[in-house]
Image (spheres, rainbow, N blue to C red):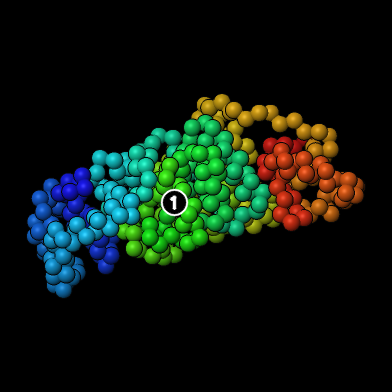
Amino acid sequence: MYDYTKEQLCIIWLDSFLGLEYKHKAQILEGVNNTSSITAFLEQSKDYLINALGENVYSTLKSSANREYLEFILNIYKKKGITAITFRNENYPKTFKNINCPPIVIYCKGDTSLLNAKNLFGVVGSRKSLNSSLALTERYVKELIKADFIPVTGIAEGVDAKVLTTAIEEKSKAISVIAGGLDNLYPKQHFDLVEKVSEKGLVVSEYPPQVEPRPFMFPVRNRLISALSIGVLIVSGGMKSGTLYTAEYAEEYGKDLFVVPYSAGVISGAGCNDLIKRGAMLTDTPEDILSFYGVESSSEELNLSVEEKEIVNVLFSGEKHIEKISSALNKRVFEIMPTLSVLEIKKVVVKNGNTYGLTRNDLED
């Protein structure tokens, strides 16, 4: 049935009961091996289930221990294009086996062969990032993709969404790991984005499709991003950003951790600076990451005029309103507008209203 072994079917069946806590499922499965049927599965774990959950819960499970219920679940997954991979499947991610609370089942849409790819690289950041940080994200992701890395991220607004949209624009594969089930995306407006990711890449959840995301699921989800990746890039993050959980897991799992630095006073970069103080590798250009892995950058050298360099030097300390830029250069606004436009075309600066910021930190004269 659906290319699953009997044991795998039992695990999928067990994980479908949302009322059972992870610890109960894990403890049940720890003592159950090579199960020939769901009935045998229940018999082997009867004492534990009754002691832990009570007679009523055990009766509920037993009443659902039939082929019809299991086929009902699997048919739903099939219609939705979801593949359930248990921790006893051959293609279960090897990197998940030694992490905190490894998922019993992971629910996937897309190319599941990516789960064990050797070139996965995490890129995450704050939902509330500067426009310049989003432009920087795009630059890093493009260079990583050119070097045959596959980006791994979440689904949030800000950096996560920029990672995924850039991968789609570059016709690259990407992995999006979500909190909650595949039927309950958050934010909901990213439904189309996730569908596009699944067409070429992969979307992953550790919860059955109908599970609604709860606050605790987001930081917990970040352990999977770090576990899948050989290295992680933190583009932005405040001192209380959930992004920092990804960094902590990366450090715990011995992954390479790269962090973009920020000027003093930038709230969305304070957490990044703190990570660098604690030993994370500072990166202000994609070449830092590529050279670390022995990959030669394919990016062309950027030549700037004297006027362009002057503006870049003014913006190096952080985003600035156009009036402050003109004042710093002792020029009128209309005099610097053409140069700013050229820098936008070259994707050196990004505009937010009348405020401009750099997309890269390696251009100071």
Going by the numbered disc 1, the residue's amino acid type is Glu
Extreme residue in the front direction: 79
Q: What is the x, y in percent for residue 324?
A: 83, 53
Q: Quadrant of residue 52?
A: bottom left
The residue under label 1 is 195
* Residue at 44% in and 35% down: 119
Q: Quadrant of residue 279?
A: top right
Q: Is residue 103 visible?
A: no
Residue 247 placement, left or right of 238:
left
Number of numbered markers:
1
SS for dot 1: helix
Point out the image quarter for the C terminus: top right
* Residue at 77% in and 33% down: 304
Q: What is the x, y in percent for residue 115?
A: 36, 41
Q: Quadrant of residue 183?
A: bottom left
**Mark 1 closeness class: few <14, some 14–19, many ≥20 residues within 10 Å:** some
* Residue at 9% in and 59% down: 39
In the image, is residue 209 above or below residue 88? below
Q: Is residue 166 visible?
A: yes
* Residue at 13% in and 62% down: 65
Residue 152 placement, left or right of 110:
right
Q: Nearer the viewer, residue 90 or 254?
A: 90
In the image, is residue 77 above or below residue 146? below
Q: Nearer the viewer, residue 303 or 191?
A: 191
Q: Nearer the viewer, residue 304 or 168?
A: 168
Extreme residue in the bottom direction: 56
Q: What is the x, y in percent for residue 150?
A: 47, 38
Q: What is the x, y in percent for residue 22?
A: 28, 60
